[in-house]
Image: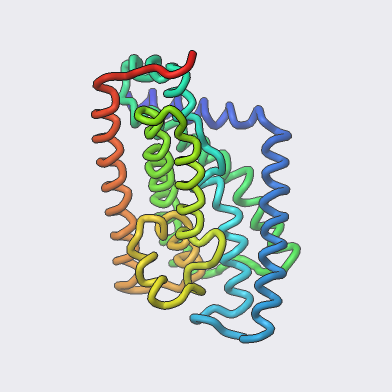
Amino acid sequence: MLLFYVEVARTAFRRQLIYRWANLAGLITNIFFGVVFSFVYIGLYQARPLVAGYDVHDTLRYSWLVQSMIMVILPFGWRDLMLTIRTGEVVSDLSKPCDFCWYWFSREVGRSLYYLLCRCIPIYIAGMLLFGIGVPGELFSWLAYGLALPLGALLGIAYRMLYNIGAFWLIEARAVGTMAEVVGLFFAGSYVPIPLLPLWLRGIVEWLPFSGLLNLPVQVLLGKLSGSELYFALARQLFWVIALVLLLRLLVSVATRRVVSQGG
């Protein structure tokens, strides 16, 4: 069965290669926003050279890492599962001789691998060329990042599957999906770096699952976490992955006891 899930992931990776122009447009869009955010931060740091232990160089790295990882962790407008529920195609997925949740996880792992290679790396290279941000050089940071990034990707898959299965109960679930994406991206550090938030708000956000999506992997790679603080943050990220997966499986179990097809 493991080979089946590997094949599902490989097929999803190859399928994503087909959309060359869409992927190029997305790449340009991420670079554009990276440039806009960078000039905003450069302007803000003219007033103060250091904020919460971050200088302008750290913040530019943070911003470009977030832009490069967004599609790996939490793709914009992901409605794939929601659409299968709406059209009734989900019945086909449920009838497959495999686990429904792991089938969709495998699909999204393949997609995330594509975005890692074809979106994440090129975007950060663009940031290096445009703003000279360089590459973090600490070996231990890269090793910890090698754990934090996959956990963040799994957390992102579980999160977006959770708001997509709302379509089992809601006739029009796209509004819920849009709100969930905005909330997730804000508290993940996409719009404003989490370390730059007020101390009281940062303390709350770091305990939410959203921090493990983008903020934690970025902080790990930048070497801002070390020792027991790093291990505790990774353990908290793992906890949220397990918690969201268990919640997802519970809700899928409840929803599929009586599937009602909406639409076609």
Q: Is residue 96 above or below residue 150?
A: above
**Left-right relation of 110 to 67:** left
Q: Is residue 24 above or below residue 6?
A: below
> Which percent across, then down, holds residue 165?
38, 33
**Left-right relation of 169 to 76:** left
Dividing the image into 4 quarters, which one contains the N terminus? top left
Q: Nearer the viewer, residue 171 or 215?
A: 171
Kindly indicate the quadrant of the structure image that contains residue 66.
bottom right
> Which percent across, then down, holds residue 219?
47, 67
Q: Residue at x 66, y 86 (%)?
A: 47
Q: Residue at x 72, y 40 (%)?
A: 24
Kindly indicate the quadrant of the structure image that contains residue 234.
bottom left
> Which percent across, then down, holds residue 34?
67, 59
> Which percent across, then down, holds residue 226?
38, 73
Q: Nearer the viewer, residue 53 or 45?
A: 45
Q: Nearer the viewer, residue 46 or 259?
A: 259
Kindly indicate the quadrant of the structure image that contains residue 35.
bottom right
Extreme residue in the front direction = 171
Q: Is residue 86 above or below residue 214?
A: above
Q: Residue at x 72, y 69 (%)?
A: 39
Q: Nearer the viewer, residue 199 or 31?
A: 199
